[in-house]
Amino acid sequence: MKKVYVFAALIVCFLIAALPAFAGSRSYANDLLDEWMAYADEQGYEVFYSNVDRIDTDNSVSYYYDLEPGNYYFVAEGGEDTEDLDMYVYDEDGNEIVSDELDDNYPMCEVLVNESTSIEVEVIAYSFSGHEDSDYFCFVAAIEPGNAAPDTNASDTDEIIDYWTNWAEDSDYNVIYTDSGELGVDDSDTYDFELDSGHYYIYAESLEDADDIDMFVYGSDGEVIISDELSDNYPICEFDLRRADEVQIKISSYDIAHGRSTEYGLVIATTEDGAILNQGSDVEIQDRPLTDQTDREYVDGLRGSYMEMVDDENYEMIFDEIRLLQDGEPYTMRITLGSGDYIVYAEGGLRIADLDLRVSDGDGYVVAEDTQNDSNPVCEFSTRDSATYEIEIDPYDMVSGWSEGYYVIVIVRD
């Protein structure tokens, strides 16, 4: 029988207050993680490990701990597309101690340890909603006050590289590059590659859980292909190259928990069609100044990528537009939509740091919103009858030194 004496109250909170997100969103799972960690902190429990990871029905995710006597709590919660997520805890001989196999996406287990021992906590996904077959989830391990938490930080960067290498290989990706480095306060390291066309995954992680490091991937024209600026120490970037291109990977320290520097590991993986063609001095990345023209050209490129996505996914194209937004001046548009399932994509250019999106019906009721701290919000909603909706696009934050920037909006019917 599942024991949930401490965290049970949070179930109601999560069922009532759903977070805005889109399919497979790591940002959504990161928000769930923040909620669980905040709750544990409010209750006085010590979180000794937390993580956001991706899971599918073919691969479980396991966490291993050497525990001292104490009362431990483990909780996971799947993203918006996760229907059934279970958890199993095993002792050092592989025997099951406790499990949560309820038909929900937030398994929780409590384990009382009377003597030093090793355990495995396994998270298994059984089903996803719609046509999804994978999603991100968050995981939190906490200990009751007055007990000694285990040290879960990696002892060196080799452990970090081994972890992400194993994760990539378990996901049937080819690891094509690994490295380690050291970052000072407000410091950055860059890696220059010419990559063949293909699908790429880049993982980085620092030694200290409390660090905050970010990742940026630039194309040969100096424009950002993708970035991960979440408040954690393990940025992940996933992207497609439709043709061979020269890219630069930038790892930056936003906050260092202890001392004046931190070490990190880097792993680059790809599907079968990706490869490194050249590296280092053979790669020339342009440094284009941020001007009105480069911002508009960048957004034009974003629109082109969305049009290709619409074709690839066989969506029905409804509306698209590029517009210049002023700092602190949200723009609201009205559109009449017939019955169906709709997705609204918006994305800011090089000068918009944070873009928010909100969809309201004719009565002013918010049917979908995305206010995450990024520049590419997505809203999904359904309508049974023809109705008029208001879509508000809010340039919540601009890049330093700029008071306006371009964005693109794309509306499709699934």
Image (cartoon, rainbow, N blue to C red):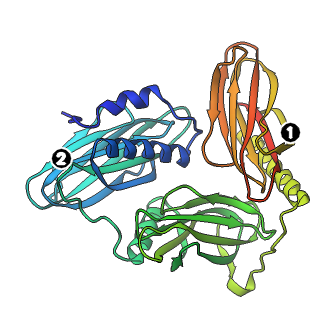
Task: Give the numbered dot on residue 321.
Answer: 1
Residue 413 in the image: x percent, y percent? 73, 29
Q: Residue at coordinates 43% horizontally, 27% vertically from top-left?
A: 15
Looking at the picture, does residue 279 appear above or below residue 258? below
Q: Furthest-left residue in view?
A: 114
Place residue 218 in its image quadrant: bottom right
Name the one closer to the observer, 85 or 11: 11
Q: Is residue 57 shown to the viewer in this render?
A: no
Q: Secondary structure at mark 2?
A: strand
Left/right placement of residue 209 relative to residue 43 reads: right
Q: Residue at coordinates 59% horizontally, 58% vertically from top-left?
A: 229
Q: Dividing the image into 4 quarters, which one contains the C terminus?
A: top right
Residue neighbourhood size for the residue with mark 1, other residues' Cα within 10 Å, grouped as few (<14), some (14–19), many (≥20): few
Q: Residue at coordinates 74% horizontally, 46% vertically from top-left?
A: 347
Q: Furthest-bottom residue in view?
A: 281
> Does label 2 or label 1 sit earlier along the sequence?
2
Q: Are marks 2 and 1 in contact (CB under 8 Å)?
A: no
Looking at the picture, does residue 389 appear above or below residue 273? above
Name the one closer to the observer, 315 or 4: 4
Q: Amino acid at mark 2?
A: Val
Residue 198 in the image: x percent, y percent? 67, 63
> What distance separates the C-alpha of mark 2 from that of mark 1?
54 Å
Residue 224 in the image: x percent, y percent? 73, 62
Looking at the picture, does residue 175 appear above or below residue 409? below
Q: Furthest-right residue in view?
A: 293
Place residue 201 in its image quadrant: bottom right
